[in-house]
Amino acid sequence: MFTREELQVCKRCSLHKTRTHALVGEGNIHADVMLIAQAPGEREDKENRMFVGPSGEILHTLLNESNIAENELYMTNLIKCNLPKNRKPKQSEIRACSIYLDSEIEAIAPKILAPLGYYATKYIFEKFTLPSFSKKEFPELIGKVFISENYKIFPLSHPASLLYHHEFITKFVNNLKKLKQLSRS
């Protein structure tokens, strides 16, 4: 797997010009579950830590509510650098940065990949040759299990969406509980 130092000098796309840090994944390198978010937010970029911003706060709370200890997880991002103004990632950025995620998946070898949100799920589905889907179809995939190669793929909504849609919190917690059960089976 790549080192933190290698990632900090990455210039594979133009995001290196606007980032403070390129974030390396965090957590248990022997985890059965890998959470894959889209990209670090502004606060994550400044502090060089995963999930320390508003969506991270809600994620930590809901993981705790679901009895999932963070030391049971490895958390990472599809894109390792902050996307200016939280814009959508460009396909060229995904292509350039995905080598790092691929390396993490290979090194950690989790049983379950849990992509958070549309872009992370889309990349994982393409990587593991699962059926393509549109943004409109994405909500139907959330909380369902897909099998490919040696992985169970369990798409989840991104916790940032819960900041604006509190009505989805119960469903998110239920999906985290399913994820916990899935990791034990």
Image (tube, rainbow, N blue to C red):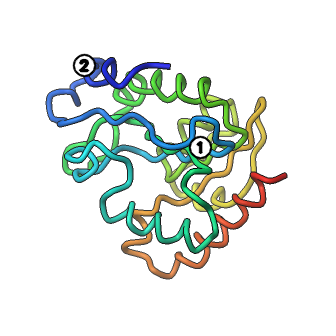
Work out which residue is located at the far left of the displayed protein and give it. Answer: 17
Query: What residue appears at the point 27 percent right and 24 percent down from the top-left corner?
Result: 8
Is 10 on the left or on the right of 66, as rendered?
Answer: left
Give the residue number, with chain letter if any, for mark 2: 9
Amino acid at dot 2: Val
Which residue of the protein is positioned furthest toward the bottom in this rendering? Answer: 167
| Mark 2 nearby-residue class (10 Å; few <14, some 14–19, many ≥20) | few
In the image, residue 14 lies at what x, y percent? 21, 25
| Residue 169: image tag | none
Q: Secondary structure at mark 2?
A: loop
Residue type, label 1: Met
| Residue at position x 24%, y 44% in the image | 45
The quarter holding residue 176 reads bottom right
The disc at residue 34 is 1
Image location of residue 68, percent across then percent down: 62, 62
Name the image quarter holding residue 151: top right
> Residue 57, relative to residue 119: is it above or below?
below
Where residue 108 sits in the image (x, y, percent)?
61, 31
Task: Give the Cα distance between marks 1 and 2.
Answer: 25 Å
Residue at 68% in and 60% down: 143
Q: Tell whether 48 sits left or right of 110.
A: left
Given residues 94 and 115, the one toward you in this image is 115
Mark 1 residue crowding within 10 angstroms, few (<14) / some (14–19) / many (20+): many
